Image: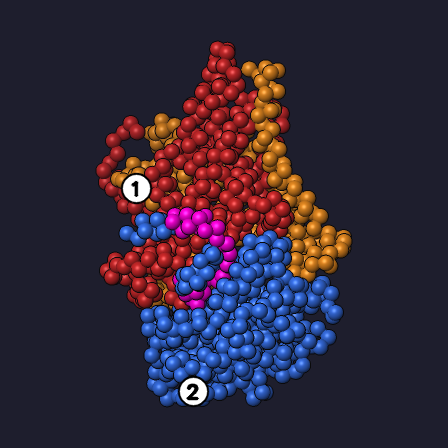
Chain colours: A red, B orange, C blue
Amino acid sequence: MARAIPTRQKIVMSVIAWAIAFLIFFPILWTILTSFKTEAEAVATPPSFLFFDWTLENYVTVQERSNYFRHFMNSVIISLGSTVAGLVIAIPAAWSMAFVPAKRTKDILMWMLSTKMLPAVGVLIPIYLIFRDTGLLDTRLGLVIVLTMINLPIIVWMLFTYFREIPGDILEAARMDGATLRSEILYVLVPMAVPGIASTLLLNIILAWNEAFWTLNLTAARSAPLTAFIASYSSPEGLFYAKLSAASTMAIAPILILGWFSQKQLVRGLTFGAVK
Amino acid sequence: MATQHSRAAARLMMTPAVILLLLWMIVPLSMTLYFSFLRYNLLMPGMEEWIGFMNYEFFLTDPAFFAALTNTLLLVGGVLLITIVGGVLLALLLDQPIFGQGIVRILVIAPFFVMPTVSALVWKNMFMNPVSGLFAWIAKGFGLQPVDFFAEIPLLSIILIVAWQWLPFATLILLTALQSLDSEQLEAAEMDGAPPLSRFRSIILPHLARAITVVILIQTIFLLSVFAEILVTTNGGPGYATTNITFLVYAQSLLQFDVGGGSAGGIVAVILANIVAIFLMRMIGKNLDI
Amino acid sequence: MRLLPTLIGATSAVALCVAAQAETITIATVNNGDMIRMQSLADDFTSKHPDIQIEWVTLEENVLRQRVTTDIATKGGQYDVMTIGTYEVPIWARQGWLVPLDDLGDDYDVDDLLPAIRNGLSVDGKLYAAPFYGESSMVMYRKDLFEKAGLEMPEEPTWEFIGEAARKLTDKSNEIYGICLRGKAGWGENMALLTAMANSFGARWFDMDWNPQFDSQQWKDTLNFYLDLMKDAGPPGASSNGFNENLALFQSGKCGMWIDATVAASFVTNPNDSQVADQVGFALAPDNGLGKRGNWLWAWALGIPAGSEKVDSAKAFIAWATSKDYLQLVADKEGWANVPPGTRTSLYENPDYQKAAPFAAMTLRSIEAADPDNPTVDEVPYTGVQFVAIPEFQGIGTAVGQQFSAALAGTVTADQALATAQQVTSREMRRAGYPK
């Protein structure tokens, strides 16, 4: 901004912003704190905020009970795999929508989005039967396929709105220089669209990581990701707040850290064409 | 620039995405459509027979159906209202120069990264529980009767949980849009002596219209299928207070294992979702020239 | 930290598995304490059967039920051993979905299984799932609070006494609630309690022609008694409390009484988890002088889906996990009080167990008092104490449970809840083609 900001105003605004941000973040903070308490302390009134006996016992218990790393790896593979597959399919589609728009482009885009409105619970049985017959039950491949299809519309849309901001002349120029379509997309468009692609990638990893219906219902032991890990802690017997908190922290920590480190990239492309 | 060659190429490039989505939509959907005309319960194999529209009749006359329809609309509308109003205010705040802007932004977007099941469990047990929850403790500290969230205001409680998860998303999109606002225009208005509220109404809000539309569209898609939060917290009750269409279909097809009835419910849900979609697209068409 | 060894362990386990050409069985189980313990003790099994590897799928009860039912009904073949309850076993066995377990080995001693439990898991005299633990329901109460209030809990209380005592014990300003009962909607949650309770009031789900009976005076009495009691002496938020929530309340010392699964007895008396461990007393579930008590009968059991290709390995596992030796193993490692209860007569005759588990006698009496074939005062066309063993029940039970939960939350009256329950049940039963 051009003007000097009065310091007083900045301080007041900062205090308000910090207070609100803290409130919004508090449930997560509270979960993390609780995960270091004993079960008895976790339900104690008045609750203790920082001054309790910090313990790692919940993490030990959780790790003894379940193979966290297998669930974690499954989550990584499934969310990365489905996102990359989605990008590979979506980049050409978004290119053609953005640079060679046809009369029906908008309709196709909207139709794609509307496929996301299929209620998953209503089609579980058909999908389960198909997966059974194709041997995809409890495979990571199966989940990658499903999550790719689920998130594809969002990927196409995000990329499309981002590509549209890129001036077509540059692509045109590349074509004049004799670039093939493949190299036009790979070496001209993609590098220019890196921020948009990065942001799409991140958003879809987050969405895939947190998808809890298909990942739970189409897996058993081998390919179950962290959502299934959480389902084994969601209501065990007895006092369970501390163990639940530990498991929750373990399930959300990777994506939280990823999100924090990459928030600039995530935010930059997250416009969905809302910014002109 | 669109030569004949590139038009053909462009169609080709769209084909994989279109065909895959078409398959993904049509195969399960046609199976569901077929099942919806059958008496078909997974737990009673061998009794399948064609029964015409009976499953639909049964689903639509379910006393829970209208409650579920209303709840779905209230849930979507309530969350949209909270996240958009809250998101605009937060975006305005975060757009100000403040100390530690990066950290504040990190804290604000964090809820978006949390799995729905986890957030529902945490809210239900550690915050909204009327005996050992934190809210109850605060209320008692003020000498008030703790609110019994899932009995007294069940739907609102779920709306609050879901809104907490989606507020960061709305804030982010609105913030990005806000940052693209030409600050000179604002300053000029300020020089002219326009009070903050009228500056907001005449400059900022119109500028945010497109972003708000986008938030509505994307969130609606996800909010129509809210399910985990309900299953974890209230199981659709008390009564039908928190049963939405998705939960009703779930009860039919995965509790009852009545594939026929569940499929009919699924088809009804698809039709309803499409009505919403058409409505949304109209709105988008006006606001968003894509 | 522990990270590296685990990783190495996992890798070497995979390597071993490949080297020995071991057969891997997948076991689906609920995340209850006893099953978690079984999982941690499974090394004992694999060391005895080096050619068998185990994959665990541990899920929360509702998710598990949905997963295994989908899988077995579509013949998905994901699991070799499934943890199922007394509700599923008779229905699935009649469909031919379960492998009969009539040859679990010579030293299995199938006649040692408690008759009530064994009966609940058999169809036409054949056992289709082996009980891992069995439970009924009973009253758990706080001796210290009873003493302070000058009350004495009889071994066989009536509902009238329970009601009186609960109101006397309640001290809301100190967060002591006279009675904690389930209120969360669900056929296995509030309806388990209410159906069992209704039996002792002489109510029933259906008459002999499968007509729903929610318009009867007995149901009205049951529901009104429950609602009044909970209003006067129950904890806030009761309409979303299930087994786990109530357990947490009781363990943290906020309930005077709690009527729930007998298996909870070992949790509330375990000093590691419970703040009131040394103050818990037990009594039979209440009655109303009609000859039936309000206690249910349930068992979590291990069964093998008919499609499994690893039946022998699966049987070997089931025989291990439900054997007398397993009880001994748990006793050696964790003490007698922690063995899975309610399955074997010999356990209740074991003096070590009787000494370590103050709740043993009451648990056995409760289990023996439940009769799934004659659950209530009048004759019924169905089996099951706290459920009706027909496939439609899960849906109907949950829909009715939602109505009663709403009545508890105060959004509808008892009469409205019963009327809606009657309507919902009639509708579903008509649709399912009853009377058959």
Question: Percent from the top left, x then y, of residue C139?
Answer: 46, 80
Badge 2 density bin: few <14, some 14–19, many ≥20, Cα 10 Å: some
In depth, the one of B187 and C308 nearer the eye is C308
- C361 or A238, which is in the foreground? C361
Q: Quadrant of residue C71?
A: bottom right
Looking at the image, residue C151 lies above or below residue A202: below
Front tag of 2 and 1: 2
Q: Which residue is mark 1?
A: B103
Q: Amino acid at mark 2?
A: Met
In the image, residue C106 lies at what x, y percent? 53, 72
Q: Position of residue C194 (x, y in %)?
A: 55, 74
> Which quadrant is home to the N terminus of chain A?
top left
Q: Amino acid at mark 1?
A: Ile
Q: Nearer the viewer, residue B137 or B13?
A: B13
Q: Which mark is residue C229?
A: none
Residue C36 sits inside the magenta stretch: yes
Residue at screen point 66% across, 70% down: C422
Badge number at residue C153: 2
Residue drawn at 26 percent across, 34 percent down: A5
Q: Which stretch is magenta?
A: C11-40
Tell me which residue sits at (50%, 54%) in the image.
Answer: C23
